[in-house]
Image: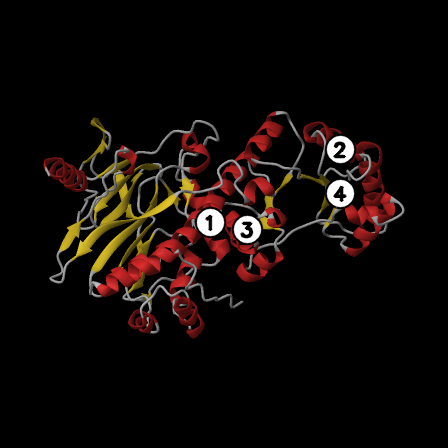
Amino acid sequence: MNTQRNLTLLTDLYQLTMMQGYYNNDTNNHEVVFDLFYRNNPSKNGYAICAGLAQTIEYIQNLAFTEADIAYLDSLNLFQKDFLEYLRNFKFTGDIYAIPEGTVVFPMEPLMRVKAPIFEAQFVETALLNMINHQSLIATKAARVVRAAEGDPVLEFGLRRAQGPDAGIYGARAAMIGGCAGTSNVLTGQMFNVPVSGTHAHSWVMSFDEEIEAFRAYAKLFPNKCILLVDTYDTLESGVPNAIKVFNEMKASGVEMSSYGIRLDSGDLAYLSKKARQMLDEAGHTDAIISASCDLDEMLIADLKRQGAKITLWGVGTNLITSSDCPAFGGIYKLATEIDKAGNEIPKIKISDNPEKVTNPGTKKVVRVYDKKTGKIVADIIALDNEEFDESKSLVLYETNARWKKIKLKANTYTLRDLLVPVFKEGKLVYDVPQTMDVRAYSKEELGTLWDEYKRLVNPQIMQVVLSDGLYELKAKMLENYKKD
């Protein structure tokens, strides 16, 4: 399905006012490098799942000011005529490197590196952050929820509670990347070819004179997708017994039910699911699904699991699609390098009274270190782009804020992987965009490279993200020079 939209004006006004300032100062050919990264894992998690690259690619490919855009900007009485004329032929001509969607990532490492004339690199900031921040947030939240479900399928049910259509559509896609088995969002299903799933509402039951008649009608329509909502009136006295009657009738009539069961949407889910399981099993429906919804999140699911709940399918809505405990990802976009007309790179650093806000200068890459025997992540290295590492040599990694602490790896006991891959080169797409379900499968593999300690829902182990020797020395030198000024 073609979903392309022109989102060129999806930006903050100051991006355009800065562009006009650059234009007036004749910096058209001034190339720069920006990093997109984040400082803290959402929900106090041990990792994040990056997402949003596919929409970013679509945005960059369609970046162009229409006549209507120019007319609107002209009406603001802020912009000079010659600058508006320049915008008529504006397009992205730079390079973008990015970590692929579905990859496990950690704070401070560049998720995306943009090298372009400063006009272009500055202008795309807002849209890139909008897309990467939101979708990485929801993918990470979904991974936590799926983790809590311990192998049970999780369905994303949040469209009606999402903050608008785009948040619902792309949030559902991100939830799939994070590990959900399906979504209730039909448009997401159509746009990204992902499984859609759903049952019926209480209003369906209430529209019939008798609950059992509502169940019979639904079962007749969808015999192989028959999940009946049993808590409209009385779950154990009416809903579950009536569902069992309908299941008995279906089996007696020769219907082979491949997917059937009940859904609980209120009450004590642990108690009700255990009683319902007993009733279903005694009636011979041992393969019936017990699904649950009702304001679930990862912490409640984990608690229900500890209580022995017999739920086998989880529908998670509001708390997933809004990431209610942590509603913002906090990604940022900072200048790292300027390139002069002779092609020389000039590293840039942002100084702050808050140490965590001091940026890492220069054009960088992210190198992931794996234990060769287990395939698990040992650490990530943020390094200067021209630094080289050799797996046939021993490797010493120094903790960034405590250099006396170090990890020593013997030669040939580890493997290395560059995480940033080329997406655009000189404005041309050079990346094959995978299908969403392929990204989901890749993300599952990525999570498998983390020890369980890093995936705990509470107080997870923190992955070491270290600075290479070259980057550490560059940063220290720049900070020392700043102190002398």
Q: Position of residue 360 (x, y in %)?
A: 23, 42
| Label 3 neighbour load within 10 Å: few <14, some 14-19, many 20+ | many
Pointer 2 residue: 276
Circle 3: residue type? Ala
Disc 1 to disc 3: CB gap under 8 Å: no
Answer with mark 2 or mark 3, whichever residue precedes in sequence. Answer: 3
Disc nearest the viewer among 1 and 2: 1
Residue displayed at 55% across by 61% down: 191
| Nearest to viewer (mark 4 / mark 3) | 3
Decide: few, some or many residues near mark 1? Use Cα within 10 Å; few <14, some 14-19, many ≥20.
many
Name the residue beneath numbered marker 3.
172
Q: Give the quadrant of the C terminus.
A: top left
Q: Secondary structure at mark 1?
A: helix
149 to 220, vertically: above or below: above
- Residue 45's place in the image compared with 254, above or below, is above
Dot placed on the residue nearer the N-terminal end, 1 or 2: 1
Q: Is residue 342 placed above or below 241 in the rendered structure?
A: below
Asked whether disc 4 touches disc 1, contact meaning CB atoms under 8 Å apart, the reply is no
Q: Toward the viewer: 293 or 335?
A: 335
Q: Marks 2 and 3: CB-CB under 8 Å?
A: no
Residue 483: quarter of image? top left
Distance CA(mark 2)–CA(mark 3): 30 Å
Which comes sooner in the sequence, label 4 or label 1? 1
Residue sitting at 44 percent across and 38 percent down? 42
Distance from the alpha carbon under mark 1 to that under mark 3: 9 Å
Residue 221: x %, y % from top left:
79, 56
Which badge, 4 or 2, is on the more N-terminal residue? 4
Mark number, residue 229 = 4
Q: Which residue is mark 1?
A: 135
Q: Callout 2: few (<14), some (14-19), or many (20+) C-alpha neighbours within 10 Å?
A: many
